[in-house]
Image (cartoon, rainbow, N blue to C red):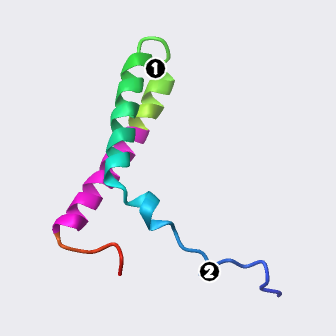
Amino acid sequence: MKTHFCKVGKTSPNINTTTNLKDLEDRYTRSIEEAYNIEQTDMGLSDILLYEAQKLKQRILNLKRLNSKGFDAAF
């Protein structure tokens, strides 16, 4: 098997985009507001937006927990 197409272990996530707490909090509030505004017209879309907001909230809480333990993102 040729491995020239395999990218496992060769790519890494962009830490600056995944750990920017302020942007995540802004996206969370926008999702909650949009879900509330759409709730009366499209309940399915509102549920999807609330689910996405819940996932964002969990990421925010995880990042805050990591930051409070004194870990540094730049190893």
The residue wearing badge 2 is 10
> In the image, what residue occupies the spot 18% across and 73% down?
70
4 over 62 or under it: above or below: below
* Percent position of residue 33, x then y: 36, 25
Which amino acid does the dot numbered 2 rest on? Lys
Instruction: Give the image location of residue 17, x and y in percent.
Output: 45, 58
Residue at horizontal 60 percent and vertical 75 percent from the top: 11
Q: Secondary structure at mark 1?
A: helix
Please tell me whether the stretch drawn in magenta is mainly helix, strand or loop: helix
Q: Which residues are magenta?
A: 52-68
Name the residue type under label 1.
Met
Asked whether, in this view, residue 65 is left or right of residue 48, the answer is left
- Relative to residue 7, is residue 71 drawn left or right? left
Badge 2 density bin: few <14, some 14–19, many ≥20, Cα 10 Å = few
Q: Which mark is residue 43?
A: 1
- Return the disc, 1 or 2, that comes first in the chain's sequence: 2
In the picture, the disc for residue 7 is none
